[in-house]
Amino acid sequence: MIYRAILLFGPPYAGKGTACKNLELPQLFYAASGNIIRRILGEQREPFASQINGYVKNGRLVPDDEMCNIFKSEVQHLEQTGVYRPSEQLLFLDGIPRTFEQAKSLDDFLDVLEIFHFTNLPNSVLRGRAAKRVQDALNDGKQPRTDDNPVAIEQRIKDYYEMTFPTLDFYKAPLRCVDALLPENCVKSQIRTLAMNAIAQYLSELPVNF
C-alpha cells in the first residue's frame, strides 16, 4: 500500500512540531521521526533501542536503512491497530524522509502530495531557540532532551543543510513556503490554512471541519 503524505521541511528548532502537532484537524495524522525514536528509546524496544541510542545522544541521524525500516513498521502498526486511518487521513510527516536515500527508499511507500517548507530562519535564531528549550525544561524541573546539548545542536543544524535540505530536489510535489520567523500564532495560522486547502483538495469526499 502507498500512503498519502504531506511533508514538513525545515531546520531543527524551526517550530514544525509546535505549529503542526495540535492543529485539531482529524484528517491529518501527525508523525514526527523524533517522537518515534524517543518512544522506542523510552520503551526500550529492542532491537531498535540499542541500535539508535548512540546516534541520538550525539545528535547524529539514524542510518537511512534503519530509519526507513523503523518508520514503515510504525506506520503499518498504527494502521493495523486503527490509530491511523489511511482512507480518511493524510500522513503529516515531520523529519522523514530526511535524506535523499530515505526519499528514494520510501518512494514506493509514500505518495507525497505537498511539502510545507519552514523558511527565513538564520542559524542564530535556531541556536537561540535551542537554548530557550533547554532553559524552559530546566525551569520546569525536567531534564532537557538528550540531543539538546551544544555539540548535538550544531551537528543537527549542519546535517540539515548538508543532508536534508538537498532532498527537496527529489520531489516534484508543490512546495508551500512558511515564514517561520513570524510569531508562533501566525506560523500556526499559515500551516492551518495550507492544511485545510490540502484536505479540501485530496480528501474532497470528507468535510474539512468535523
Image: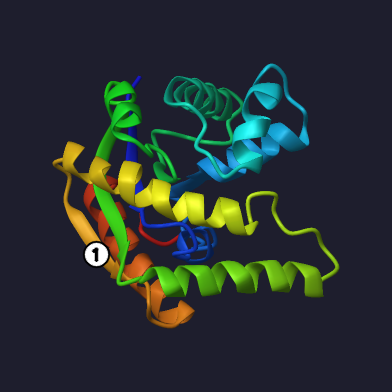
Q: Where is residue 209 in the image (x, y as percent from the top left)?
A: 41, 62
Q: Position of residue 69 (x, y in %)?
A: 49, 20
Residue found at the very far right of the displayed protein: 141
For residue 83, what is the image quadrant? Answer: top right
Q: Going 45% across and 25% down the picture, which residue do you hit?
A: 68
Observer-nearest residue: 134 or 58?
58
Observer-nearest residue: 60 or 116?
60
Q: Going 73% across and 24% down the picture, which residue do you hit?
A: 45
Q: Going 44% across and 64% down the picture, which residue do you hit?
A: 14
Asked which secondary structure carries label 1, the reply is strand
Observer-nearest residue: 33 or 30?
33
Q: Residues within 10 Å of mark 1 (few under 14, many from 20)?
A: some
Q: Position of residue 92 (x, y in %)?
A: 41, 47
For residue 111, what is the image quadrant? Answer: top left
Residue found at the very far top of the displayed protein: 47
Observer-nearest residue: 173 or 76?
173
Q: In this view, does 143 lie to the left or right of 51?
A: right
Relative to residue 42, is residue 145 depicted above or below? below
For residue 176, what is the image quadrant? Answer: bottom left
Q: How many marks?
A: 1
Q: Can residue 206 be seen by looking at this rendering?
A: no
Mark 1 is on which residue type?
Answer: Cys
Q: Position of residue 171 (x, y in %)?
A: 19, 39
Relative to residue 64, is residue 121 depicted above or below? below
Which residue is identified by label 1?
Answer: 177
